[in-house]
Image (cartoon, rainbow, N blue to C red):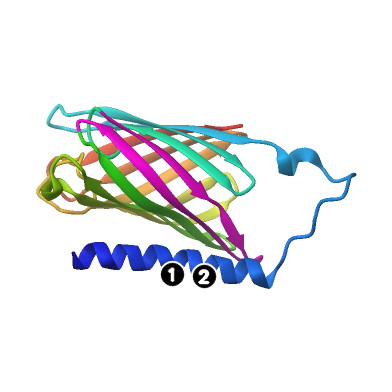
Amino acid sequence: MKVILRIASVLVFACWSCQLFAQGTPSQPPSQSADNSSKAWQYSITVDGYIVQDGGSYASPVGTADHNWLHLEARYNYEDIHTGSLWAGYNFTAGKTLQLAVTPMLGGVFGRTNGIAPGCEFSLTYKKLQFSSSNEFVFDTSNHGDSFYYSWPELTFSPVSWLRVGGVAQHTKVLHTGLDTQRGFLAGVSVKNLEFTTYVLNPDLPMPTVVLEVGYSF
């Protein structure tokens, strides 16, 4: 119960903070000659392929759609194997030199695991450094004892615009190892709207996990 209360407090604080940022810089109504790109939908498709040494390899696709403040997301094999989830959230942004982006969300989880999940995605960017994290708590409606917390934080550095390197961690129900939290490093490159990233989790273990990710935005 303490963990649940802490997560709920974090989500409320994030939403409250973003509202303060938004109040500090009120947006102006667009003029008739404004660029229509601000009204367009933005989409992304990302597929993570987990190469697990014990034969439990799997793929996890994620699709997103954003329109101004509205964020929609669909996932599979993310919260659990053979499990899908649908999400809706609100996009907040603030700052110029130090850029903050926060999206509190609420999702429904169905399949091998069924439940309701409050979550939050955020990133903090300063020049070539970025810290980002995806968090959620899944309240399992079939068995309350199977409720769990998921987190995927990254700290990256981009020496050039098309390259990023850094560290990553993951606390998940899907990947089973002797560690509660997986940790490792990443390297990624981007070509126009395509991104390719390689993650190596638990590189110090006899059987590390490799994640190959490809993403496309349009």
* Rendering quarter of residue 33: top right
Q: Which corner quadrant of the image does residue 4 belong to?
A: bottom left
Q: Residue 17 carries which label?
A: 2
Q: Which residue is drawn at 34% across and 42% down?
A: 199
Mark 2 to mark 1: distance in Å?
6 Å
Where 115 falls versus 100 (above or below)?
Answer: above
Residue 162, disc: none
Residue annotated with mark 1: 13
- The boundaries of the magenta stretch are 83-112
Q: Where is residue 69 in the image (x, y as percent from the top left)?
A: 60, 49
Badge 2 amino acid: Ser
Is residue 17 toward the left or the right of residue 13 in the image?
A: right
Q: From this view, report whether residue 94 is shown above or below residue 162.
A: below
Q: Which of 198 and 88 is in front in this view?
A: 88
How many marks the image carries: the answer is: 2
Q: What is the x, y in percent for residue 147? A: 18, 49
Residue situated in front as seen by the camera: 165 or 8? 8
Amino acid of disc 1? Phe
Snapshot quadrant of residue 48: top left
Whether residues under marks 2 and 1 lie with C-beta atoms below 8 angstroms apart, the answer is: yes
The local secondary structure at tag 2 comes to: helix
Left of 129 or right of it: where is 213? left
